[in-house]
Image (cartoon, rainbow, N blue to C red):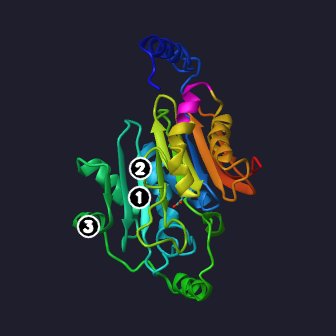
Amino acid sequence: MGMKRRDFIKTTAIGLAAPTTIFGGSKLKTNKNDPIILSTWDHGLPANDAGLISLQNGGNAMDAAEAGARIPEGDPKSTSVGFGGLPDEQGNVTLDACVMDSTGNAGSVAFIQNIKHPVSVARKVMEDTKHVMLVGEGARQFAVSQGFEEIDLLTNESKAAWEKWKKKRRKMTPHETHDTIAVLAQDNKGDLAGACTTSGWAYKMHGRVGDSPIIGAGLFVDNEVGCAGGTGLGEEVIKTAGSFLVVELMRQGYDPTKACEEALNRVIKKHNGNPDFQIAYIAIRKDGKIGSACIKWSFEYALARGEQNKLHKIKGLL
Ligand code: GLY
């Protein structure tokens, strides 16, 4: 059934009248002089420290977010990010990462192999190419052309874990592997930026790409409103444009935690109120208020603000 023209006009008028943004009325002040770094999981603590050092050395929000994300990427004990990340079902470590800065620029790499710091390659894509996203072999070639060293990302430990898994091929979900790091930063000018990096779902299908390199899914930054990042089952984050949704909800006036909750409620509803997987979001609003929520079990985020860098544990909505 087609929509009559008069109905269309009515719908459009209502659509236009609906949400007033909190920022249109500039009710919130931009947070300045109180830099914030907010990261997912406990690997967020050392990531935040690196971000703070970057800010102290004159870096901006983008420098801080990148510096933070590089820490678990280089740490073989972080088995869901970068070097030492658990491989796909064929034993290949394939990495996804993206960055977004305060000007709305973005860069991303997906399914990249043999490069330790995909987040920095993503930043190079943003700054030195006309593109937003490079994948696979093209991303690797670009990284090498930019001077990134090639290394074997599979450690003895991650190889042993994969060989053990291969015997039974048990289905893994991302929350079992601790997952992605998203790092959100606000510098002392009040500018926002973010970075996100992961080795993705452990023992995934070869070629699988998750939410972490998808702008609007694993990460989104709007310097007028706020920024958000996600961790958990990437497929479901992509299908709900999760981080973009969190930022848009903040634009409509949702408090950062309520925005994260509402974005997760949409996923929960799609799964008849009982999803069997985890997603968590973190968010910073332009005025410096932060928020977070997760679907179930629990989730930890690391928050660095002022002199303190602390881990905070939250319970799931279900
Ligand atoms: N959130 C990470 C992934 O699903 O790959």
* Residue under label 3: 147
Crowding near pointer 2: few (<14 within 10 Å), some, many (20+)?
many
Q: Distance between the residues labelled 1 and 2?
A: 7 Å
Q: Position of residue 243 (x, y in %)?
A: 53, 43
SS category of the residue bearing label 3: loop
User: Which numbered disc covers residue 119?
Assistant: 1
User: Which numbered disc covers residue 227?
Assistant: none
Sequence-wise first label, 3 or 2: 2
SS category of the residue bearing label 2: strand
SS category of the residue bearing label 1: helix
Q: Nearer the viewer, residue 168 or 106?
A: 168
Sequence-wise first label, 1 or 3: 1
Tag 1 and tag 2, C-beta contact below 8 Å: yes
Residue 66 visible to the viewer: yes
Q: Which amino acid does label 3 sit on?
A: Gly
Crowding near pointer 1: few (<14 within 10 Å), some, many (20+)?
many
Q: Which residue is drawn at 37% across and 72% down?
A: 113
Q: Position of residue 276 (x, y in %)?
A: 70, 59
- The prevailing secondary structure element of the residues shown in magenta is helix
Q: Nearer the viewer, mark 3 or mark 2?
A: 2
Q: Which of 32 and 28 is in front in this view?
A: 28
* Residue under label 2: 99
Q: What residue type is labelled 2?
A: Val
Q: Which residues make up the magenta segment?
A: 247-253
State left or right for residue 273 relative to residue 39: right
Q: Which residue is drawn at 59% across and 89% down?
A: 167
Sequence-wise first label, 1 or 2: 2
Q: Which of 185 and 12 is in front in this view?
A: 12
Q: Where is residue 127 in the image (x, y as percent from the top left)?
A: 28, 48
Q: How far apart are marks 3 and 2 (CA)?
A: 19 Å
Q: Which residue is drawn at 48% across and 55% down?
A: 212
| Residue 306 included in the magenta stretch of the image | no
